[in-house]
Image: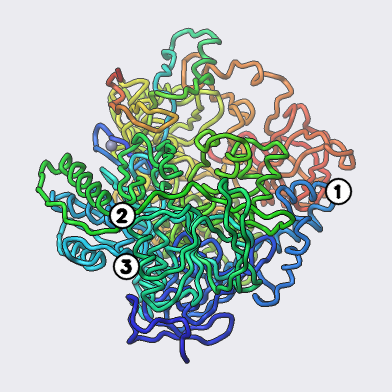
Amino acid sequence: MLYIKCPYCGLRAQKEFSYGGDATVKRPNINEEVSTEDWDNFVYMRKSPRGKHVELWQHIAGCRQWIKVQRDTATHEIFQTAKVTEEIR
Amino acid sequence: MSQPFRLNKEGLINRNKKISFTFNGKKLFGYEGDTIASALIANGIHLVGRSFKYHRPRGFFGAGVEEPNAKLQVEFNGHSEPNVNATEMELVEGLSATSQNCWPSVNFDIGAINNFLKMFFPAGFYYKTFMWPKSFWYKIYEPFIRKAAGLGVASIEKDKERYEHKFEYCDLLVTGSGPSGLSSAYAAAKNGAKVILAEDKPRFGGTLLTDDVSIDNLSGKDWAEKIISELKSMPNVTVKNRSQVFGYYDHNMLVMFERVSDHLEKKSKFTPRQRLWYIRAKETILSTGSIERPIVFGNNDTPGIFLSAAAKEYMKVYGVLVGKKPLIFTNNDSAYETALEFKKNNVEPIILDTREEHSSELIDEAKSKGIDIRFSHGVIVANGYKKVKSAKIGKLNKDKNSFEKIETVECDCICVSGFWTPSVHLASQSGNKLKYEEKIDAFIPDKKKQHETSVGAANGSFTLEESLKNGFENGSNLSAKITDTKTEIAIPNVNEKKYGAHDKFWCMPLPKNENPKRFVDFQNDVSVSDIEIALREGYRSIEHVKRYTTLGMATDQGRTSNLNGLQLVSNIENKIVPEVGHTTFRPPFTPITIGTIVGREVGMEYLPTRKTPMHEWHEKNNAVFVDAGAWKRPRYYKEGNETLFEASKREAKNVRENVGICDVTTLGKIDIKGPDAAEFLNRVYTNAWMKLPIGKARYGLMLREDGIVMDDGTTTRISENHYHMTTTTAQAANVLSHLEYYLQIVWPELNVNVVSTTEQWAGAAIAGPKSRDMLSKLYPDLDVSNEALPFMGYKEAEFFGVPSRIFRISFSGELAYEINVKSDHGMFMWEKMMEVGKEFGNQPYGTEALSTLRIEMGHVAGPELDGRTIPSDVSLNGLVSKKKDFIGKNSLGREAFNVESRQKIVGLIPIDRKSSIPEGSHIVQDQNAKLPNPKLGHVSSSCWSVENNNPFSLAIMKDGKNMIGKKFFAVSPLKNKSIEVEVISSHYVDPEGKRVRS
Ligand SMILES: [Zn+2]
């Protein structure tokens, strides 16, 4: 079970969190034209990298904040966590 | 009754307490502190089971977790447990053990015929034979294999025991209390670290209990006792015996299995049987020791053949002789200690040493005591079927591939030692890539992957001095980093015997024309020839050889067989062992009970139960409940002998004719506040929200970004910047997360806050043509006319002195209202409604009637919004704004969503107006068509229309409304039904929606 450092609450067990996918995906702006290709990329296309991956988790049984977690998808090593408003290197 | 193999004095058992037990019906006794194995051996019993494939007689081989054979069905403390390791299970009064995998008895087992037909059971036998003919698989092969493959029998009784889970955090977890574990724990404890020391066995000390050593002039056992009692007195240390750390998971989380009370005769009601510990450790010391490996020889599975260290443990810990005429067969010095122990107890052993004549401290001692030592010798084949009677031994030639001399010697046990294998399972589970250490012919941990540090024998250091030094240093250094304290500890003086080098010898050759079975893996009956076949048939990777032969795949995880198997493959393939590689270790290290994994999460404790404030009333009034997530909702209120069908029909009809009330507390409720709340709702919902006036509700539809409907519900504007959103019961948690995602990540610039208020409000719906009359009685001072409180209107008013919210919304399609009060007032509200409603014919209605009402109105719910439908599929395209952007809008233009023949919602009625259509039925053109019969759609919701008094269903069907008027068949192979149906509009009752506005 992973041990995830919530930037608000500190180290907590994985079972307090729910997974939210790739954190680098940016939603096209609301009320702006978007090409079909860009939209499809946003909705469907995800990389499945082996290695470092910045992803979203929500501290669902804690502060309910969405956070960023930089994790190695192969080893589960977590390098860094951050608030969603913060950048990960 | 005497125990013929019990020594008079030796051992750590309590001879003052006799314990009686039975084995295969025979009454026996042992002492407190015995295992089932030691007590049986003391009674001269060695035949305890039959092997897995050939049903060969099997006895004990080890004295602990390494045991491959002695798995028993054990009944004790009122339960029956299969596959219990006889070498680990402690004796408890009244215990009754029976052999497994044998019929009719362990002495006469019909399955043993497999042993004589063994040419039919080589490696891969099942794969090859049972492939043909295909039709035989289900009826003949599979049942036969199942029967033959059984180990013990799981109980079908309910497990009455209590199992617990515990979460713990520590600075240092030490796994094993041998010399290296004790010294690590001690050093860390002295540095002030929070330490957990876990020992699998009942007694602490590991090899210190059996090795002839001294530390600071104390015997190993006394030193261990001294350290343990000091550790136990320290507040920062937890010391646990009967506790095995069996799994090393991510981020330094280890899981430990504690056998709390199986050894106790009496215990309190609340003492758990077993406990699972989840331990998050900052650092871990792996002091799991090593396991002796055997040398492979003919019929090496005959009862009476032991690992030599196990034989020594039986003498020193249990005061039991495994035999009185022992042969010691070894390639190293450690078995000499077993021989000396026999000698000390006046038993004359013969030592067969595969090494050429040489000298070492132990060999010299054995010689000086007059022990018969034969160098360059080994056991070729053991004789005896149910017990060793003699052995054919041979003098090896120089190359050790044939014999110079062969003779037969009498013996009643053979103690074998092929050197030591470090227990690296935890290190491997942690992700450590292990490396091959040629000096000891075994794998040891390589570079650290997590915070694991292997010490002592688990790291390949087999001397006491090294293990202690290793332990003290690592325990001290690792903990000092955490506590910032370093206490100097003098490393004690050690007195131990020096071992000479071992012989890299692991399998006895066979003389010409002799072909006895030579087992590598006892538990799965894998022999040398099986591995040879696998390689001959082209299996190269060790993982493939393992799966084809099942080598190391039994419950003992190949503890005594893996390395010998690897050696065999490496010899045949002419590769060195590290090139062959090793298979992966996986948790759990030893079998653990399902009960422990489940813990207290059984029955009512499996999930929290959510009850509405009116739950007690429902209970008292014969409600039959249904689970809605964790909620309990009344499905119907039973009157007399009513069935579900009759009750729900009565309740629904009463809503259509009079008035009914329904507990709607479980609906998700979300409070939305902030100056940008309207803008946020406008983006979340498909319809327009910027102009909703204060005091008005609106029905809203929300999509996922892929255009699929996510949820629906009403949202009410309570005040300028305050909205009250409702969601379906099922989607409440998801919708909240969804809203939080957009507010926190996508549009953080919006000044809006959301919070769940589901449990803060109790809700009751009042529905039916007489609901307004009833409402006016409930709020005598309030104008509830259609003008003052129109459809989708909202008011706040006192409900008999209690603040309340009134929403004029409807799920049933009737004139209806929903009243919310604070949860604490829920019961008050409900009882008042029942009282006031009497004169209007009010009756409570449950979810079944609620479904009926919404289905015949054509209102979609969960079964239609099933994660596959877009708004136009369920006739909700009127709610999709063309003017503004919203979540998922861009996806609605996708080609597949706009195909004319796309499946859309319709209504169905049976032609006979009688037959109910099962939900999930497929709609087909021709009920007799050849399979696969082309599917045109499926039935999503079915009810008995109370308005029209005949069955009615909603369906999602190809071409949707274009099919209206046509006839099809709804077929349900599950219910074995085929019903002719006609397609009609999905709005079966009040299609114009006049009633809700009346
Ligand atoms: Zn948090």
Residue at image location 32% in from the left, 63% down from the top: B211
Discs 1, 2 touching: Cβ within 8 Å: no
Q: Is residue B186 above or below residue B675?
A: below
Can you tell which quarter of the image residue B861 is in? top right
Q: Identify the amino acid type marked 2.
A: Lys
Give the residue drawn at x 41%, y 84%: B19
Given residues B105 and A88, the one toward you in this image is B105
Q: Nearer the viewer, residue B935 or B119?
A: B119
What residue sits right under mark 3 in the picture? B203
- x, y percentage for residue B822? 32, 50
- Does mark 1 have its CB less than 8 Å from ligand 1? no
Horizontal and vertical percent position of residue B637: 55, 63
| Earlier residue among tags 1 and 3 | 1
Residue receiving disc 1 = B133
Asked whether residue B783 appears in the rendered view, the answer is: no
Can you tell me which quadrant of the image ligand 1 is in?
Answer: top left
Real-space Cα separation, disc 1 to disc 2, in angstroms: 62 Å
Q: Residue B108's x, y, as percent?
A: 70, 76
Q: What chain does mark 3 sit on? A: B
Of tags 1 and 3, which is closer to the observer? 3
Q: How many neighbours does mark 2 have within 10 angstroms: few (below 14), some (14-19), or many (20 or more)?
A: few
